[in-house]
Amino acid sequence: MKKILAFMMLVLSLTTSSYAALDVGDAAPNFTAQAALAGKVFKFSLADSLARGPVVLYFFPAAFSVGCSIEAHEFAESIPKFEALGATVIGVSSDDIDTLGKFSVQACQGRFPVASDNTQSIMKSYDAVMMLRPDYANRISYVIAPNGKVIYDYQSLNPSRHVEKTLAAVKDWTQSKPKP
């Protein structure tokens, strides 16, 4: 019984928002990847996006699953708020680019890109591979400042708070940065 309880505590500790692969202040690994926006495939570059402002990078398990579709829809509805703060949003999963092309039209409503990481190189560099289902990304969201440092992270398999929390983090960062 004690072993079962210990295992359950370990699993719970790994799925709460207090655990994240990268800590605030860590350098976010740079990457380029094939991505789709409104069904059109292009090369996404984190460095290029950071040159324009903060980036909300979120990992999701699988396109068209219920939770991932809900999360993508909520991000899509909030894109004007992110853009008003100068932020870019990019979703990443291990889905192939053809699947993500369709997902970018339907769930993402053509408002933000989703990148294919079918080799899991990005997921591994962010330690975002789901522990119990290693073929999938864990649901982790990061806010990355233009200097390439992580300024916020949130992990929860529940998709409902990622948009709210990352938007608040971008607002906080925008309000706290020194004025020129």
Image (cartoon, rainbow, N blue to C red):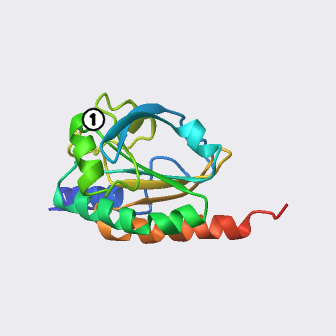
Q: Percent x, y for residue 168? A: 54, 71
Tag 1 residue:
97
Q: Percent x, y for residue 136? A: 24, 42
Q: Quadrant of the N terminus?
A: bottom left
Disc 1 packing (10 Å; few <14; some 14–19; many ≥20):
many
Q: Is residue 61 visible?
A: no
* Nearer the observer, 7 or 16: 16
Vertical placement of 41 versus 179: above or below?
above
Q: Percent x, y for residue 2? A: 20, 61
Q: Percent x, y for residue 63? A: 22, 49
* Nearer the observer, 149 or 167: 167
Three-letter amino acid code at the position of disc 1:
Ile
Left or right: residue 13 compared with residue 79: left
Left or right: residue 69 compared with residue 163: left
* Nearer the observer, 114 or 136: 114
Please tell me in which quadrant of the rendered image residue 42 appears. Answer: top left
Residue under the image location 47 percent in, 69 percent down: 165
Q: How many labels does the image show?
A: 1
